[in-house]
Image (spheres, coloured by chain):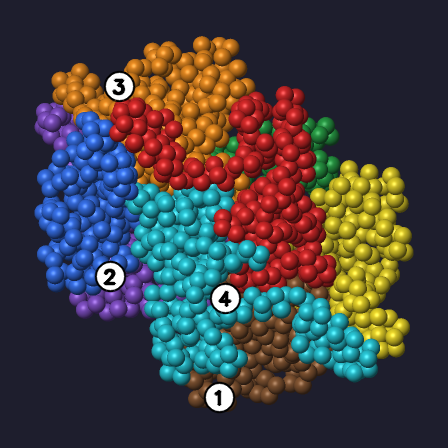
Chain colours: A orange, B blue, C green, D purple, E yellow, F brown, G red, H cyan
Amino acid sequence: MNKPEILDIFKKIQAGEISPEDALLKLRAEPFEDLGYAKVDHHRELRRGVPEIIYGAKKTPEQIAGIAGAMLNKGQQLILITRLSAEAAEAVGKSLPLKYHKVAQIGMIGEMPKPSGIGKIVIATGGTSDIPVAEEAALTAEALGNEVVRLYDVGVAGFHRLLSNLELIMNAQVVISIAGMEGALTSVIGGLVACPVIGVPTSVGYGASFGGVSALLSMLNSCASGVSVVNIDNGFGAGYLASIINHPCRA
Amino acid sequence: MNKPEILDIFKKIQAGEISPEDALLKLRAEPFEDLGYAKVDHHRELRRGVPEIIYGAKKTPEQIAGIAGAMLNKGQQLILITRLSAEAAEAVGKSLPLKYHKVAQIGMIGEMPKPSGIGKIVIATGGTSDIPVAEEAALTAEALGNEVVRLYDVGVAGFHRLLSNLELIMNAQVVISIAGMEGALTSVIGGLVACPVIGVPTSVGYGASFGGVSALLSMLNSCASGVSVVNIDNGFGAGYLASIINHPCRA
Amino acid sequence: MNKPEILDIFKKIQAGEISPEDALLKLRAEPFEDLGYAKVDHHRELRRGVPEIIYGAKKTPEQIAGIAGAMLNKGQQLILITRLSAEAAEAVGKSLPLKYHKVAQIGMIGEMPKPSGIGKIVIATGGTSDIPVAEEAALTAEALGNEVVRLYDVGVAGFHRLLSNLELIMNAQVVISIAGMEGALTSVIGGLVACPVIGVPTSVGYGASFGGVSALLSMLNSCASGVSVVNIDNGFGAGYLASIINHPCRA
Amino acid sequence: MNKPEILDIFKKIQAGEISPEDALLKLRAEPFEDLGYAKVDHHRELRRGVPEIIYGAKKTPEQIAGIAGAMLNKGQQLILITRLSAEAAEAVGKSLPLKYHKVAQIGMIGEMPKPSGIGKIVIATGGTSDIPVAEEAALTAEALGNEVVRLYDVGVAGFHRLLSNLELIMNAQVVISIAGMEGALTSVIGGLVACPVIGVPTSVGYGASFGGVSALLSMLNSCASGVSVVNIDNGFGAGYLASIINHPCRA
Amino acid sequence: MNKPEILDIFKKIQAGEISPEDALLKLRAEPFEDLGYAKVDHHRELRRGVPEIIYGAKKTPEQIAGIAGAMLNKGQQLILITRLSAEAAEAVGKSLPLKYHKVAQIGMIGEMPKPSGIGKIVIATGGTSDIPVAEEAALTAEALGNEVVRLYDVGVAGFHRLLSNLELIMNAQVVISIAGMEGALTSVIGGLVACPVIGVPTSVGYGASFGGVSALLSMLNSCASGVSVVNIDNGFGAGYLASIINHPCRA
Amino acid sequence: MNKPEILDIFKKIQAGEISPEDALLKLRAEPFEDLGYAKVDHHRELRRGVPEIIYGAKKTPEQIAGIAGAMLNKGQQLILITRLSAEAAEAVGKSLPLKYHKVAQIGMIGEMPKPSGIGKIVIATGGTSDIPVAEEAALTAEALGNEVVRLYDVGVAGFHRLLSNLELIMNAQVVISIAGMEGALTSVIGGLVACPVIGVPTSVGYGASFGGVSALLSMLNSCASGVSVVNIDNGFGAGYLASIINHPCRA
Amino acid sequence: MNKPEILDIFKKIQAGEISPEDALLKLRAEPFEDLGYAKVDHHRELRRGVPEIIYGAKKTPEQIAGIAGAMLNKGQQLILITRLSAEAAEAVGKSLPLKYHKVAQIGMIGEMPKPSGIGKIVIATGGTSDIPVAEEAALTAEALGNEVVRLYDVGVAGFHRLLSNLELIMNAQVVISIAGMEGALTSVIGGLVACPVIGVPTSVGYGASFGGVSALLSMLNSCASGVSVVNIDNGFGAGYLASIINHPCRA
Amino acid sequence: MNKPEILDIFKKIQAGEISPEDALLKLRAEPFEDLGYAKVDHHRELRRGVPEIIYGAKKTPEQIAGIAGAMLNKGQQLILITRLSAEAAEAVGKSLPLKYHKVAQIGMIGEMPKPSGIGKIVIATGGTSDIPVAEEAALTAEALGNEVVRLYDVGVAGFHRLLSNLELIMNAQVVISIAGMEGALTSVIGGLVACPVIGVPTSVGYGASFGGVSALLSMLNSCASGVSVVNIDNGFGAGYLASIINHPCRA
């Protein structure tokens, strides 16, 4: 419920078309919306034509299928389910037309939208083991209407691989830098590009990598400007954030 | 040195205007630039008209004055010095026309540019104690050509203060959310707005706040999408990142 | 053994009905009780009519059945077994009339008492994944004679869901706020209500949530007054504490 | 603004006494209150006659004096300022009739209220060094209308001191248990009493006490039921929570 | 090789019964012993009549059987194998006369010695779950010639159980206090007895117990004198240390 | 109050010499003692002739002088004050005949007792910087009636220094091993001797020594048997423990 | 591509044998090499005749076989695959002539080179459980052309075993010291030898060993000079580093 | 005392020139040396002509002057004192001809030796603030006879500065890479060079740099081979290690 809608209700009270008691009830029934807070409307505007997202972890296949079914009924064109295990995907797939991306552990119902952002999102990884997180980011960004360039296995141990792709990175609107172990890739990219860099530490590594903490700290302390960080292994969060940066409100 | 410039050198070799040995020397002398990597040029394009930034911490007043003086000689129009103590500011101010912002510990030489971003940057803090970090972010963003809206002391303990400013937050292009202690403000804002939210944990708090770690973890684990995090107390980093989000390359 | 009982023993010594040696023995045999410390009596008074609780984790089904059987023999009307796995429940259920609540991992023998507290206990969770901990708290509180209001999945990412239930929360005598990830829900509720808020961090989350540590720190550092915290995933402890707050000794 | 007030506004719209546009404005001007959320009113009811609290740390004497002065103008009868250094107290005391409690670092303006709670709050400390935190809790509780029993230096190293005061502890409505080092006192008290126990870990100790972390963990893991914990050294938070437990809404 | 033996070798050189080259060789062949360092001899004196101990974890049944067999050949009267899984015990038991203590995960070959210490070792645990660690300590101490008194499940949550056994604890030569969770038992015992108390934190607990770290820190910070600590779950270490305290060299 | 004394009271009740009410009062007045718990008596017996110890940190000179004065009045022959700063020592020295050991930060009133233990306590340190902690341990042990052998600066970096003193270490009844940095000395000594080894990690070191945590962990994980650990820098605790090991109850 | 090669390209441009566009293309195709950075060539020179290494963890058998096959096609003489599980080894072995070292989890294709270093590498372990890490180091070093001396199970608990092998250690060019638990072995060796010592903490241990962190900290804080550390369990890294120390560029 | 010397003693016993008792005494008097362990001799050989090093932290000026004076008496040609404060330097300088390097906090007595290593040691830092640690490393290495190349302020934020110096780095025999914050420089250098890289994390940074822990973890997890790490800020250790790598025993 946005400002005009609230005014509309008030005018209906004034016109005697609705009683004050009913107006109050309406406010409670559709909670925040009834109070006219912009947020919900803003979200709706934002989400129009973009997929609603279901976090699949710790939900049963029945719950997931139920939520997705309700969305389909509302006319949702693309539904994204993250952290969806192969078993859950198979179960959900029995009742719904699910496409499953195994590496990214993402399920989708509906068609990918065309890219609508102002530029490209480059997704770089330090190694091969980071690819599952990267694909979660990539599919999320694509599902939200972005053109994604994948640049995998360009970590600093084989540094020339990154340098030989500099032009590609330089042309990004946003870079998602994904790395485990020491996470140095993010600082290096941050020192090379002028656009926002989203660091995603991964739990790849052993010993003193502490399940991604080492990479996380490394990225948080990056001496390069323009770098921010999301949670360990949070490919979805990075893809989502990159998308809203790539879709500025007034661009 | 960009691609056309490299090709130009090569053509000069071809035309005999420059010897191969001299070309190699040129490559070494202006290291990366000579090799045509876009980064440097990109940075220069980016930085044109915007201030060069000096990190003042752990530098002597002499070093700071020296670097700033060299910049002035190059025609730099606005110089920003962060983490500048009052003592150092006084010393630098003797030889250079420095304006000093005590709360933010920022020194500036030159005039603030006019806002050139596509929208506004809202900077919200949980409490009064977070204001120094917020001002570092605000002045950085303003120095980089952004319109900044300050919204201080709107933490969740007095929640209605935030709710009464929702429209203001909803209209932001980027929100910088700055909070110590439990850092819940960032998640709450992330749950309300549709634009990117940059969380800045602060070292405000005591006991189990562990100098900002509690707020940092809170923000990293935000259940709201669109949130990323910079280092504890890193107001400058947040202001810089917000600015490049607010100045998309192709907007 | 309370004060009158001790005096009674002393009078029996005085009257020659019991020898000093036997009195000493009696003191040793029922140790603390013989000394008349209020604690035991107090506990007995407290527990009268309320279930004795068995912590089921790391106990064998035989041990659990043995303890419960002894309680039944003593006339215990309601027995609560927490952290009881489905396998153990099945084994215990063969010899005793056990009702098993799978989600909460709680087994019960006997009937729930009627609510006897001075108000309602509201149990709010940030998400769906926190429900097992919430149900452990809810069933514990109900078994101890409390009316419980469940308010699940009202985390700050979908903030309007909480706001639309404010009246309900405002009327609570105690609120148990259960959340994983960044645990911001607890601070937000703490900023809204006037009654005691018991925070229960959960191990829900990934990466830098560190098995609940992030939520724990967040709650400990809550800038809202009236908030205290129990151990990660300790639904039982929260339900127990809420009950004794809801049953003040002299209310 | 509560429910009747909202209905009143709506009826005024209906009666043509106020235009819908003005109603919307009113909603924005007094933000959350205008929307009739109970919280604010609840808080006001709660706070009537009780002191408003100022957190003095990181505020200048001018800021503190300004806030306190505004409160006095509003007719506030008792003002509590926590974490107030002796220097700041002296400065504030020049313009306002401040009483300063040095050990607790608390300043007060106005008279202490009479106890209005349903029982007594017992505040126990492990040692002499915990007394500053205990006094912060005690004065806060007294200022909020509670009778406080101080029981200092009863740690488990000299265990008989606690045992000889058992009757006193047994009669408490709430116990605040304050201890540093290994914080065992809280578990021991939790094993003895039937009422809520609020654990306050203190930063007293050295080496592996890690500034209170050891005591904090000890209390969080208490095997006794009915124990919850607040932040390290947070005497104010414990006193506040104890007070609202001792003033149940419907008792 | 002790001092007299070295002198003996030297005298043999002097007497021409052994060449200097052979003496040097002898020194190298039985390294430290040849040099007469007391340690080896001391150990041999100590170990006379007591079992040689094999740490079974991460050893194959073949390795364990091999080492034990060699010991038997040397006339070892009692062999103790700690951290021996049931599977490994079964395999070892096929070739050797092994008695297996399942709860303590200890295997033994040979007969227990008679107690030879100067007093009794009391082993107290906070709960039932700590018993495996306690039994490791108890059997180790018994195998090394000590009389052990088991006092299980006397944690501070049911405090009177400990108090009713005070006389027993008071008479100990050494107390081993074993507890998980908050580990308060060790401090409480330390505050009651005059003899050495060896704290053994266990990994029993959940959430913020961090696998025994909470109990470990609690014990290290014990405000009671006479308490020292061994590694988490290190029942063997505690039993061994208690034994050498109970067998003073010159008692 | 010990068992005979309790029996005596009971007999007096029986004989009508004391009323039951007075008996109960007596029990409350001298709390735990009145109940005859052995602890107090045991402690008194233990402490007879040995110094009462005052922990001087965070106590004012007035408090320290007051406590010490009361002890002197009771006929205490030797008073030990640990963690006593030079300033506090000077203040206390004005009213009492205090001897101050600056390096150990220990003050003493009265004469050292003659050694009464069954053997010698060897105190070894890794380096020169560990000496203050070592002296705290040494003076404590001496004040409690032990012969102490100081063996300073024998860390593993100059390994031959330790080896050349092996005989001395081999003859100890207890060894206190004090080291910072990596704390390897304790494991090495533990591998060489047969008597109990008390490890005292010190806060000596920098960087990843984390104020003694590295040495603490090293000692806790010692692969040598017979080693236990006290808190970082806790020289007093080590000296006290060594003394009670060196004074076995029945030796 | 080294300096002469770049000059050669430039001369070809000059001579008209290659167009500037093709030169640029060539630079991009063989990225860093085309720009003449010495690194690649250096690596090639280094690697000539030595095995290329594949990190097998988190790679599928198909990926491993594919990479190894490509290497074989390029004429690679020895291929080393680390962290190769037995299952993966079996799968890879079906298509390639793989020799599998089960303990070290290393697979090899081709023949071991003859030792070409300037000295011997001694690999010492604290215990038997550290051998898998040691063998990873040993086989890596041997595959890179080094003579390796294995010295297993010489930890400080049985100290004479190390001392009896001193001459062997003294003659090493590099020592790799591998230990878990408290990791004291590395400091002890560091205090004995004059050559570089590479410490490898292992995850062997329990409780407060924290998966190798205790040993890691111990080694980082070594008071002996000449010691450096690699990641926990990183046998490969230690073997590789020892090899390049044992093959100095200009020796 | 080396092998021939031991044989010599034995022969003297054989020849009756020395009694066995005197031989034993001699062994004890010059402890380890008397037993012929190579270590001492090795050290002496190693140290001939190189400076003996004094760790100045936590030593008084008198102690430092005393040790240095004794060394001078033994004919030591160059004495190095690390971690020497300006105040201590001034005090030591009064009695000894000390040269003080303020930035590195190193004092020296005597002349620097000529470089005797097989190559150059390159010392690179990420920023200006790392220079004190770098100078400690550089002066240590120079004092031990190495040619040092300083390459300061080449961190990844201004990446081209490092790339433009690649040839210099490529020619190093050892590289010491010194960086705070995220420490990415070490991984990047490790990915570029073929020689050993010694990482020195520094405590430079703020917030989540945790006094160097972030850089330390980053370096330990380096995905580049050939990298090892020393303690935070341990410039001396890095310089010492680099020197012994640069002086291989048999080069």
Give the secondary structure at mark 2.
loop
| Mark 3 vs mark 4, CA separation in Å | 60 Å
Residue identified by numbered label 1? F96
State whether discs 3 and 2 lie on one chain. Answer: no
Label ID, residue A116: 3
Residue identified by numbered label 4? F204
Label 2 or label 4, whichever lies nearer to me, is 2
Q: Is residue C71 left or right of residue F201?
A: right
Label ID, residue B60: 2
Q: Are marks 2 and 4 in contact (CB under 8 Å)?
A: no
The answer for which chain carries disc 1 is F
Label ID, residue E105: none
State whether discs 2 and 4 lie on one chain. Answer: no
> Residue H40's quadrant in the figure?
bottom right
State whether discs 1 and 3 lie on one chain. Answer: no
* Mark 1, other Cα within 10 Å: few <14 / some 14–19 / many ≥20: some
| Mark 3 vs mark 2, CA separation in Å | 49 Å
The quadrant the C terminus of chain E occupies is: bottom right
Label 1 or label 3, whichever lies nearer to me, is 3
- Specify the amino acid type for callout 4: Val
Which residue: 19% across, 21% down?
A5
- Specify the amino acid type for callout 2: Thr
Label 1 or label 4, whichever lies nearer to me, is 4
- Specify the amino acid type for callout 3: Ser
Which residue: 12% across, 37% down?
B115
- Specify the amino acid type for callout 1: Leu
> Residue G141's quadrant in the figure?
top right
**Extreme residue toward the front, this view:** G15
| Mark 1 vs mark 4, CA separation in Å | 33 Å
